Amino acid sequence: MISTELVDLSRWQFALTSMYHFIFVPLTLGLSFMLVVMECCYVATGKEIYKDMTKFWGKLFGINFALGVATGITMEFQFGTNWAYYSHYVGDIFGAPLAIEGLMAFFLESTFIGLFFFGWNRLKKGTHLLVTFLMAIGSNLSALWILIANAWMQYPVGSDFNFETMRMEMTNFFDVVLSPWAQAKFGHTIAAGYVTGSLFVLAVSAWYLLKGRDIEFAKRSFRLAAAFGLIVSVFTIHLGDESGYLVAKDQPAKMAAMEAAWETAPAPAPMTVFGLPDEETQTTKYAVEVPWVFGIIATRSLDTPIPGIKELVQENEARVRNGIIAMETLTTLRRDPTNTELQARFNAVKDDLGYGMLLRKYTDDPSRATDEMIAQAARDTIPGVNIMFWSFRIMVACGIALLAIFAFGLYYSAKDLITTKRGLLKATFFALPLPWIACELGWTVAEYGRQPWSIYEILPVHLSTSSLSASSVMGSLTGFVLLYSALLVVEMWLMIRLIKTGPSFLGTGRYFFERNNQAAKE
């Protein structure tokens, strides 16, 4: 039998490291192109203040990038340590984009980051701008290949199961790279990163304005961040809608859990704005619904029904039973691999092989599974409704709030009234955590919503782990908690210290602390 304790600890460890790593990723993505915009202003106008802005926000970018690299490396090692069977079963496919990311994107990004910091006095204006642009491209390419790998986990195209090697093998590299899931996840994720970078610059600039420090520097930073943030917020919402459409089409269980859709409603289905899902009774109390909206958004039509949880469980129970046949046929085929009749029989049920594997959580021999085991395996295919329901709604609420902040911020900044709107400035500063909350909840929806699969409908999570003791995973999990907590303290100390110093650290003599010190000497 599979050790559920080992699986749970392995999941907790990977969730901890990945969600901690993603504290740094969106800010790296967002600040990278914010720096390009600022340096473009410097090259176009020749005004030194834009150069100072690029250097100051670039310093914060560098601190964040360093911590992101340090926390990201451990994630890839975990595939070999904690998820050995996963690596064996799908490594030929999943490993390819990760290898490309390391060989191409990471080295490109790292090289140009060095030139960005040390090339100011060695490169011409235009050349340094090109370096900054290539640094941003490298950051985004790094995200691209990682998201291609993740998108394949969500929508495994360009691959096939080989009964002779008992592994998934790539059949078409370009199907993996050009998957609609890869495009949607990349677009939505980097747009969310741009929102994060924009709000970071906006919030810190608002703090300077509230303190009455470095007013011109803060006003220009605020205006650029508000304009950039408003544009990318609209794109983030649009690309999120596209991701939702793909989920409804390819992962109906995830969509049903997000909406707490217990029953299959007549098309077009209503959207539940608020409610209290009850998983025991499979009802949603105090539901506030908007007619038609869910069906139109999720299916782009007025007549396509969206299956509810109860219907999906029934369908998946049939697939589990079909998966038992697939496993039995595979066992026979392994003994007689040249039998074309067996191959044809296996190919007819191969798509449900993963559903049969779900039973390995309850019995070592799925062919002897009881009706209750089969029913439980079918229920397992629905992720936790309450977590999905609230994660999605809080994420959307954060996105709407950020859109409003960018819109009002740009309006009053363009009219040069932002220094008089202290309420808006305070709201902007206290909104600083919102993009991170939205990003983390977005990944919760994406990854928790894929459960119980590590590879959707192909490989269950409980079969993906290594042959480790639970105590060894607990030991490494504890070590990661302590190490990452220390790194977080260091990161926050460095960032806060630099923010408090402000652009005065540049040593130009034009900013708050330098002028105060000069005035004191005089």
Image (spheres, rainbow, N blue to C red):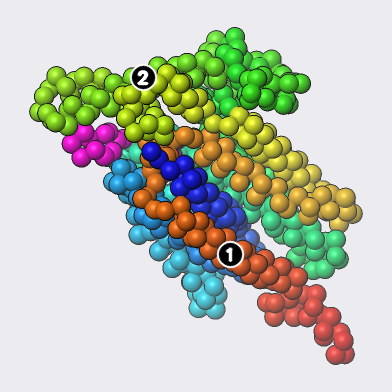
The spot of residue 487 in percent (x, y) is 59, 67
Residue 28 makes an appearance in the image: no
Q: Tell whether position 155 is magenta.
A: yes
Q: Nearer the viewer, residue 104 or 442?
A: 442
Extent of the magenta region: 148-168
Q: Provide the residue designation for mark 2.
A: 321
Question: Residue sitting at 29 percent across and 35 percent down?
Answer: 159
Q: Residue furthest bottom?
A: 521
Task: Tell me: 258 left or right of 371.
Answer: right
Question: In the image, is residue 358 above or below residue 214?
Answer: above
Instruction: Tell me if label 1 and label 2 are in contact, CB under 8 Å.
Output: no
Element carrying mark 2: helix
Residue 24 makes an appearance in the image: yes
Q: Amino acid at mark 1?
A: Leu
Q: Nearer the viewer, residue 70 or 451?
A: 451
Q: Tell whether position 307 is magenta.
A: no
